[in-house]
Image (cartoon, rainbow, N blue to C red):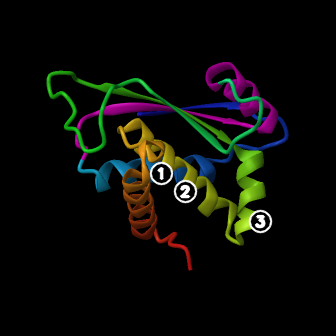
Amino acid sequence: MIYFATAADGYKITHKLKMLVRASVLATLSYEGYGQKCEVSVTFTDNEGIRAVNKEYRGIDAPTDVLSFPLTDFEGGDEPPTDEPEISLGDIIVSLERAEEQAKEFGHSFEREVAFLCVHSMLHLLGYDHERGADEEMDMRRRQREILETMGLAVK
């Protein structure tokens, strides 16, 4: 189950955008072989909104593209507990404003950027962390690339 919330003035959250996020979440779960029922919360915001959250929870007074708040203590590749009917994996907060800026900067579509940010964040919710060293960073980048390829959103 994916729950959506919006805190982004000036952005219309379309059905198409929600379906893109849903596809990104499901593609990541499928790639990881994660079959357990789960829920994820996705909040769309702007740069000011994500800056405030970044400052409050990470002590960084600057906007970022996406924040992940895992509700589990998984390490990447861990099997989920099978005795729970549904697991809350955590929360994803996406700055649509920053996604728009980065799409222009990197020369690809807004949709591809949002998908990338959701895949990236889902990997964090599943226990992967590129900040734990070069090997994990390379592994996470590979996973992101392969997941986006399965979605037809590979970097060209």
Secondary structure beneath disc 2?
helix
- Residue sitting at the far right: 10
- Rendered image: mark on residue 119: 1
Q: Residues within 10 Å of mark 2 (few under 14, many from 20)?
A: many
Q: Residue at x 46, y 47 (%)?
A: 130
Q: Residues within 10 Å of mark 3 (few under 14, many from 20)?
A: few
Q: Amino acid at mark 1?
A: Val
Q: In the rendered view, would you say 77 is above or below 138?
A: above
> Where residue 68 sits in the image (x, y, percent)?
52, 34
Q: Quadrant of residue 146?
A: bottom left
Secondary structure beneath disc 3?
helix
In the rendered structure, are the residues bearing label 2 and label 3 in contact, judged by CB atoms less than 8 Å apart? Answer: no
> Where residue 94 sits in the image (x, y, percent)?
64, 40
Real-space Cα distance between discs 3 and 1?
19 Å
Secondary structure beneath disc 1?
helix
Q: Earlier in the sequence, mark 3 or mark 1?
A: 3
Q: In the rendered view, would you say 56 is above or below 38?
A: above
- Residue sitting at the far front: 133
> Where residue 112 sits in the image (x, y, percent)?
60, 63
Q: Quadrant of residue 65?
A: top right
- Reading the image, the residue beneath label 2 is 116
Real-space Cα distance between discs 2 and 3?
14 Å
> Where residue 119 sits in the image (x, y, percent)?
47, 51
State which region is magenta.
34-58
Looking at the image, which is closer to me, 14 or 145? 145
Q: Residue at x 45, y 65 (%)?
A: 145
Q: Quadrant of residue 89?
A: top left
Q: Earlier in the sequence, mark 2 or mark 3?
A: 3
Q: Amino acid at mark 3?
A: Lys
Of the 4 image quadrants, the one containing the N terminus is top left
Looking at the image, which is closer to me, 154 or 73? 73
- Reading the image, the residue beneath label 3 is 104
